[in-house]
């Protein structure tokens, strides 16, 4: 690890809802640490971290980016994560591999639903956290309100380490509550500060906040608490030590503030990251499964332990090939070495190792515990795989991909694109496991599913940019089904006898409905050899194949039973083919007689929205024929549980975003099929025939 040892490494993710200022803050960190010689800005496209054309055009993060920087004899590995709901799957994967979090809260709007979801995931991994109130120089900025909102919404004990001097256009400095010194910002945007006296109007507030800070530090240690009770104070070193202990235990979240674009307050933040967030050595041993014995195994975060690393991101490029980002948990990984892939049961040759700064690659010779590095051109390794020492294999756990919530049918713009579309999309699916690509056997459409409309649109843009394949997005066809509500008895005779050997088959069939989800059942009640044994499977096959195209609108017919109870045959002219045709004809006639109806897919949705939007969401769901099953309260939010027809929510993602000012999110999965209401069936059948 060069001049840095494991204890001096900090490995953390920067998290918050979209638009909170994460990337601007990371750009300021790079500038303050000397990694860059100018302050990158998201708004003008000069950001190192948001470097993809799709990100520059939208001025927001779409993919997680990695960088590293030095700060006061420490090395910081930073993952800048997306905050918009469409791209939170990438954030979730990053949380699996970091040791701590830098949580942003806007001084204007506090935290939103996306931040709460991210915090929930981070809590599952017990990640120590430092918080930063951003946008202090913007209109309506309020530090105290933002801290209170963060504490309530996330149920945390937020302890300010600084107090702002001024706000909005007058945000001009900070009070360090540990040293009780005030600092005013210089006007050169280089992050500089000049020490001064605490303004008299803020002294009382600073003393109150310092008492809370010292108490939080003292509570972590009996010796410190005893000293605090006796002397009513602690030394700066004792306060810092106590704050670190409390942060690592998850008992407090230290809070700082400033502005990323103006580079104000960033050095204080970097000091707090060094002082409060854990090194890899402070984290518990990694637990995984031995793929050979299936027993649980541990890996200590030590250089002399067996090598183990987790691949958490894949970047696909048509020119340079595949780039895998991985986090080392134990041991040392060197360039030009051979490792084992515990998931694929294969070996991989490691070429040159890189550390990333946005898209810039910095070659390194080796990586140790806590390092985040990239390696190119691994043949079989994908996101979620564990690379390890082949002699002591381990498979580390990785979160399952989130389920897509929206789907579109793809149509190539040219014949040439049609030939390349599958292979190109597979590369993007490999890069992003939450994308799903499938060919619908019923509609013959190529369906691309993702986490939201923007997610799918960005994928299509990448498809054009990276592989020069252009497609159009269309609303996919809803996979309706047909079933039978009534019963019917009928004779189906197939007779073709006009000289020579003919065809003859005669069957008597009874049709009846089944409960939803029971599929197709066939019962043989033939007695006395009315239909010979060898022909009965052909009757069933004829019915089954004919049921793939129902009599109402050509959708598969499901949940019905057919009983074969009589028939006749000809000793010469009967054949399997004749009885198969008789079965097929019998289905078409019987289905029409047994009151066929349309079934539609019903989706189970969990919609998380702010309290003030609940009424609008429930009213909207009622208008979509949804059934609200109940609500689960969350701090500042409600989770609305709904059953709703798929046809009503094909484009729900942008509509929810509009309804909640981008503060809502949802998950959706298939639940069951239900009969389409009779008053809608006629209109729906007319529309389906028009489309056909």
Image (spheres, grey):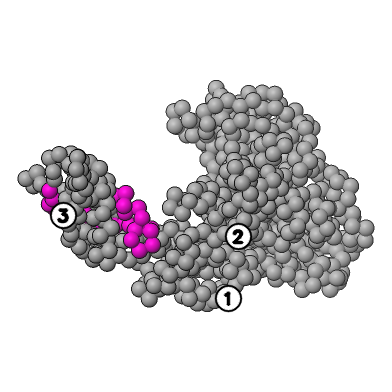
Percent position of residue 322, x then y: 66, 36
Give whichever of discs 3 and 2 has the lower sequence position: 2
Q: Residue at x 66, y 54 (%)?
A: 458
Task: Determine whether the residue tagged by mark 3 lies in a helix, strand or loop.
Answer: strand
Magenta residues, start to end: 544-568
- Callout 1 crowding tier (Cα within 10 Å): few <14, some 14–19, many ≥20: few
- Callout 3 crowding tier (Cα within 10 Å): few <14, some 14–19, many ≥20: many
For residue 453, the mark is 2
Measured Cα–Cα span from mark 3 to mark 2 = 51 Å
| Location of residue 520 with respect to 380 vertically, above or below | below
Which residue lies under the disc numbered 1? 612
| Location of residue 503 with respect to 626 vertically, above or below | above
Which residue lies under the disc numbered 3? 508
Give whichever of discs 1 and 2 has the lower sequence position: 2
**Camera-side residue: 52 or 159?**
52
Q: Residue at x 44, y 32 (%)?
A: 294
**Camera-side residue: 310 or 554?**
554
Measured Cα–Cα span from mark 1 to mark 3 = 62 Å
């Amino acid at each position: 690890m060069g001049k840095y040892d494991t204890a001096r490494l900090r490995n953390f993710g920067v998290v918050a809802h979209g638009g909170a200022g994460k990337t601007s803050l990371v750009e300021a960190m790079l500038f303050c640490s000397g990694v860059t010689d100018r302050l990158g800005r998201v708004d003008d496209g000069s950001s190192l971290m948001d470097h993809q054309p799709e990100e520059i055009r939208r001025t927001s993060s779409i993919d997680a980016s990695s960088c590293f920087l030095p700060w006061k004899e420490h090395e910081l590995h930073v993952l800048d994560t997306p905050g918009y709901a469409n791209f939170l799957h990438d954030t979730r994967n990053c949380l699996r591999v970091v040791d701590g979090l830098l949580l942003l809260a806007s001084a204007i709007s506090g935290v939103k639903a996306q931040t709460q979801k991210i915090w929930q995931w981070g809590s599952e991994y017990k990640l120590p956290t430092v918080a930063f109130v951003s946008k202090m120089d913007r209109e309506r900025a309020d530090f105290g309100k933002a801290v209170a909102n963060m504490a309530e919404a996330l149920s945390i004990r937020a302890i300010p380490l600084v107090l702002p001097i001024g706000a909005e256009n007058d945000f001009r400095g900070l009070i360090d509550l540990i040293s009780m010194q005030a600092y005013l910002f210089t006007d050169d945007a280089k992050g500089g500060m000049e020490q001064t006296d605490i303004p008299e109007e803020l002294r009382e507030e600073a003393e109150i906040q310092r008492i809370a800070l010292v108490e939080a530090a003292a509570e972590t240690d009996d010796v410190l608490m005893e000293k605090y009770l006796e002397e009513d104070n602690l030394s700066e070193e004792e306060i810092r030590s106590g704050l670190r202990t409390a942060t690592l235990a998850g008992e407090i979240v230290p809070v700082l503030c400033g502005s990323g674009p103006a580079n104000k307050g960033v050095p204080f933040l970097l000091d707090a990251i060094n002082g409060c967030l854990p090194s890899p050595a402070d984290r518990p041993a990694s637990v995984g499964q031995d793929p050979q014995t299936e027993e649980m195994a541990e890996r200590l975060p030590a250089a002399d332990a067996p090598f183990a690393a987790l691949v958490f991101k894949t970047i696909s490029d048509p020119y340079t090939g595949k780039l895998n980002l991985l986090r080392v948990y134990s041991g040392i990984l060197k360039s030009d070495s051979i490792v084992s892939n515990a998931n694929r049961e294969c070996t991989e040759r490691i070429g040159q190792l890189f550390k990333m700064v946005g898209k810039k690659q910095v070659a390194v010779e080796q990586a140790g515990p806590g390092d985040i590095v990239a390696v190119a051109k691994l043949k079989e390794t994908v996101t979620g795989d564990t690379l390890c020492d082949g002699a002591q294999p381990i498979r580390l756990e990785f979160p399952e991909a989130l389920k897509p919530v929206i789907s579109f049918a793809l149509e190539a713009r040219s014949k040439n694109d049609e030939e390349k579309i599958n292979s190109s999309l597979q590369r993007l699916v490999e890069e992003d496991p939450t994308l799903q690509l499938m060919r619908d056997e019923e509609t013959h459409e190529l369906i691309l599913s993702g986490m939201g409309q923007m997610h799918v649109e960005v994928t299509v843009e990448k498809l054009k940019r990276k592989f020069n394949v252009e497609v159009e997005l269309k609303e996919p066809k809803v996979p309706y089904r047909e079933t039978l509500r009534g019963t019917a008895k009928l004779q189906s005779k197939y007779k073709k006898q006009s000289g020579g050997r003919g065809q003859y088959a005669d069957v008597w069939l009874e049709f009846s409905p089944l409960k939803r989800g029971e599929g197709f059942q066939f019962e043989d009640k033939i007695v006395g050899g009315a239909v010979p044994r060898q022909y009965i499977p052909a009757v069933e096959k004829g019915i089954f194949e004919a049921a793939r195209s129902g009599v109402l609108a050509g959708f598969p017919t499901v949940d019905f039973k057919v009983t074969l109870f009589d028939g006749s045959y000809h000793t010469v002219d009967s054949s399997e083919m004749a009885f198969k045709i008789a079965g097929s004809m019998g289905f078409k006639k019987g289905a029409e007689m047994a009151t066929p109806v349309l079934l539609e897919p019903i989706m189970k949705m969990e919609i998380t929205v702010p309290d003030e939007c609940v009424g609008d969401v429930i009213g909207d769901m009622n208008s979509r024929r949804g059934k609200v099953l109940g609500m689960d309260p969350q701090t500042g939010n409600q989770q609305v549980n709904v059953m709703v027809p798929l046809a009503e929510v094909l484009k729900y993602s942008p509509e929810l975003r509009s309804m909640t000012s981008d503060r809502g999110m949802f998950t959706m999965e298939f639940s069951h099929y239900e009969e389409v209401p009779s008053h809608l069936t006629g209109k729906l059948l007319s529309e389906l025939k028009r489309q056909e």
